[in-house]
Image (cartoon, grey):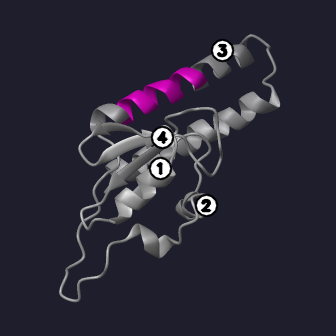
Amino acid sequence: MSPIDTVLSRLDYVKPTRPDRWRSSCPACRGSSKSALSVGIGDNGSVMFTCFKTGCDVSSIAAAISLDLEDLFPPRDAHATTPRRRSMLTAGQALVVLDDEANFVFTAACNLANGVELSDADRARCIDAAAHVAYLLGEVSQ
């Protein structure tokens, strides 16, 4: 069984989004969203994860489905070259995420300007928004 087949068989609510890309619930943070986790196949056949709920790291996601990091990679070819990493997001997907985060931050800023104090959850969500935008910057800067 290939690494991606192993991973997909252990995830819940898996939906294909385009060739070599899927969305599912994140097994590490166990959020209520059925599409918080983006799953993809890298150029070298490795499995790539991005959690859009809490930004779970790859090792936590792998551990949550009882896999080691090495299980996310195909067997090594002794003569293979190191491929360039493929982006997990299309430009359109990145813009959708950026739009969502900008709208949230705008709403929070308007509330602050009108004297409405942000709740702890809203402050945490602002930090998440900043992390998501930083992630997008990293994706497009490759």
The magenta segment:
94-104
Of pointers 3 and 4, the one earlier in the residue sequence: 4
Q: Nearer the viewer, mark 1 or mark 4?
A: 4
Real-space Cα separation, disc 2 to disc 3, in angstroms: 36 Å
Circle 4 crowding by C-alpha within 10 Å: few under 14, some 14–19, many from 20: many
Q: Amino acid at mark 2?
A: Ser
Across and down, in percent, residue 18 comes to 26, 38
Which of the pair 120/117 is nearer the observer? Answer: 120
- The answer to whether marks 1 and 4 mark residues whose Cβ atoms lie closer than 8 Å is no
Which of the pair 5/115 is nearer the observer? Answer: 5
Which of the pair 91/56 is nearer the observer? Answer: 56
The residue at which mark 2 appears reads as 60
Q: Amino acid at mark 4?
A: Ser
- The answer to whether marks 4 and 2 mark residues whose Cβ atoms lie closer than 8 Å is no
Across and down, in percent, residue 53 comes to 59, 39
The residue at which mark 4 appears reads as 24
Magenta highlight on residue 99:
yes
The residue at which mark 1 appears reads as 50
Of pointers 2 and 3, the one earlier in the residue sequence: 2
Query: Mark 4 falls on what kind of element?
Result: strand
